Amino acid sequence: VSSPIAVFRYLARRLLQAVPIILGIVVLNFLLLQLAPGDAADVLAGEAGSATPEYMEQLRRRFGLDQPVYVQLLLYVKNVITFNLGFSFRHNMPVLNLILDRLGPTLLLMLTTLVLSVGFGVLLGLLAAMRVHGWRDTLISITAIIAYATPLFWIGLMLILLFSITLRWFPASGMESVAAFHEGWDRVVDIAWHLVLPAVSLSLFYMALYTRLMRATVLEQQGKDYVVTARAKGLTESQVTFRHILRNAVLPVVTMAGIQVAGLLGGSVIIESVFGWPGLGLLAYQSLFARDFNLLLGIFFFSACLVVIVNLIVDLLYLLLDPRIELR
Amino acid sequence: MNMIRKLFIAGFAAAAVVGFSVSQSNAQERGGTLVMLVQPEPPTLASYVSTSGPVGQVATKVFDGLLEYDFDLEPQPSLAESWTVSDDGKTITFNLRQDVTFHDGEPFTSADVQFSIMDVLKQRHPRGPLTFKEVTEIETPDDHTAILHLANPAPYLLMGLSSYESPMIPKHIYGEGTLDDHPNANEPIGTGAFTFVEWRRGQYMRFDRNANYWKEGQPYLDRIVASFIPDSSTRTAALELEEAHIAGFGAVPYSDVNSLDALPHLEATTSGYQMQAPIVQLDFNTRREPFDNQKVRQAISYAIDRQFVIDNVWFGFGKAATGPISSVFAVTGMYTDDVREYNVENGQEIAEQLLDEAGYPRDDNGIRFSIVHDITPYGEEWQRYGEYTREALRNIGIEVRLRTEDVPTWLRRIYTDYDFDLTNNWIQTLADPVIGAHRLYHSDQIRPGTVFVNGSGWSSPETDELMDRAAIEVDQDRRNAIYHELQQKLVEAAPYVWVHELQFATVYNNNFQDLIVSPLGIYTSFSEAHQAQ
């Protein structure tokens, strides 16, 4: 088992390594975005329906778009290094404030989804694998395939149709009741109420993935020597499953979940849009079409950091789950 | 003609009904929260520097203008109690109300008018430099008189003073610091019926009743919440579930309007867009072959079946257009339908004949020439409208390839690079042709990099001269006559195909009344809106 000092050293090294990676991502993102035709001034004036040339020129000067690209890049990198993410001219707000505003709702939806999908995925996968080809396995596998194959937006809309419009159990949109302005516990309950449908829609897809992965790894583990040994020791079937197989089989699921955190950000664009959930994915999507590159780069920067951190956490989780793994 | 008369009658009837309900509403009880859907979320609340569609819907709750307008497009008092225009049209005197205060308690005075127009709107507003082009100076002899001195008469100016187009903002707030990143840009302070409370980005904006509003007893509602839901199906569901109460412009897809209208608690109306007067068009690139040829342009205009487009693409929401000026201007006498009529039964035959005459015969495969048709990236309708145009042009021997790009790319192509043959498009012709329509047709409006101006490249000394004259003509009848001539000349030259006058639908919960009381519709204060009793 690794000592706390070793863990600390490992963490420090990994974080240090992350710096050039993230800077590389920033530069690459910046250059990629330059390929998109049209700029923020075009969009703003386009939305206005009309604008004078003086107005357009004034916008471009303010946005710094009149500078050569390399100057814009150098300025941006310089700012990022000092943790200044710049200003969103479209929103007339610092990028950092805009992102922090949305971070809470994003993390709430993401973590709920992660817990639901990994939890139920592992459970269902295990259930299916324990009685392979039984009715339970067939039922779980078919449900998983359907959930996996159904487009997210359709699941979302169907849940609204059934649970909001027909049954009136849950609200159709938003993160809280906009007209009510609840406070304290009422607000917590209200938000939880609004969270149910988006979290369930998003979880269904990922749960299906983890169920199938879990089922496959459990089946694979069942034939391993250590399982035979455990049985030979006289352990009961449930002891074998929960103490030995589960712990080993869950490793690939954790790896997968770590990788998919980034995808979860992207996949939630659709859910955020369908349910009017005020998250980061939607903000990124909208700022792309608005050519609000400062904001978009800021979001990319945050996502890159998030992915690096989550991967680090996953690596540390391995240590907990499997004591044989050592830090190097 | 019959059609127009019908519209007239409908217009008067609507005005009469509204007038009636307004007079009834004097004894309205207070209370209620109205949730309005705003789509998309506005980029800013600074309506003095941005005219982005959704901005008008929220900022007009906070700011007032000098004037308001009735359904005959006649100016009505607002912050200006009365006004006089000198005989030569070069001096406009506004007498301001004396009982108006801003939300921070400071009084509204002529200094604020001077600041708003000269320092902000004329300098920084997307359209302000045009509206206030002729204003050289604003004199403020006392706190409640503002005298505008003009270099030339500007008959359109009185049409551009609504709270949507020219909000009056406090000098003591916005005069401090720079306008670019002013701390009150997104926490606006105005004189309007509702005060700004908070903006949770991605979720909602909240506006509470202004207890000191200068209109006696108004507003009736306690609160207005602007709610942002990106998905159109969910917006429809929110109206159905009464989570939201009103949605306008494109917020409800045309395909859903009628089914929502059929629900007992919802109503739909197309009134309240008269001062937007949008026209759906096809824009030719008149610099390029084959559209540098008038006969080719006319042929394409003949080939489009307006009613088919309205019925099948826009679910019936529209009215065939006859030319560059919308028929909503019939009430002012500016509009005429006495122009070349393209929307005829045998349009296809005439089109083929014109193309033959223009020197573009069909080849062995039956094709005269090939073009690329760009699609305006503002929603599904435009794609279907493009597909219709492709088929209509194929019928007269023109091969069409469709091209769809995102908004900034499309804007760049049409208004900066001019790298297109034909694009579909729509233009708000706004409250007066000088503010709305001239920018599409005047040669001084060929301005690379400026969007929604003369991208077509149409240039003619004859039409330029007409527009120059109309811009400064004070006599309404003479001005109307100039516009009639302009419409005839432009329709004959056909630098655009004017397909139909777009009608937007507003869907609202009938538990609320008197929401749409002006030709600016949801771009007004909602101070008269109240709950049904």
Image: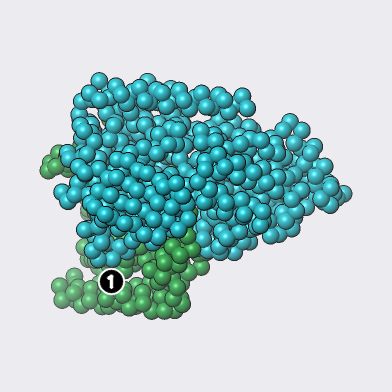
Chain colours: A green, B cyan
Q: Residue at x 60, y 41 (%)?
A: B481
Question: On the image, numbered disc 1 is attached to which residue?
Answer: A84
Q: Residue at x 22, y 76 (%)?
A: A12
| Image quarter in which the C terminus of chain B is found | top left
Q: How many marks?
A: 1
Is residue A23 placed above or below B491 in the rendered structure? below
Q: Nearer the viewer, residue B180 or A136?
A: B180
| Image quarter in which the N terminus of chain B is found | top right
Q: Residues within 10 Å of mark 1 (few under 14, many from 20)?
A: some
Query: Among all residues in the image, which is located at the extreme right?
Result: B364
Q: Can you give x and y, in whole percent of width and height, for residue B17 in the image?
A: 39, 22
Q: Amino acid at mark 1?
A: Asn
Q: Residue at x 43, y 44 (%)?
A: B159
Q: Nearer the viewer, residue A12 or B432?
A: B432
Q: Residue at x 40, y 46 (%)?
A: B85
- Mark 1 residue element: loop
Q: Can you give x and y, in whole percent of width and height, for residue A207 in the image?
A: 35, 46
Q: Nearer the viewer, residue A250 or B45?
A: B45
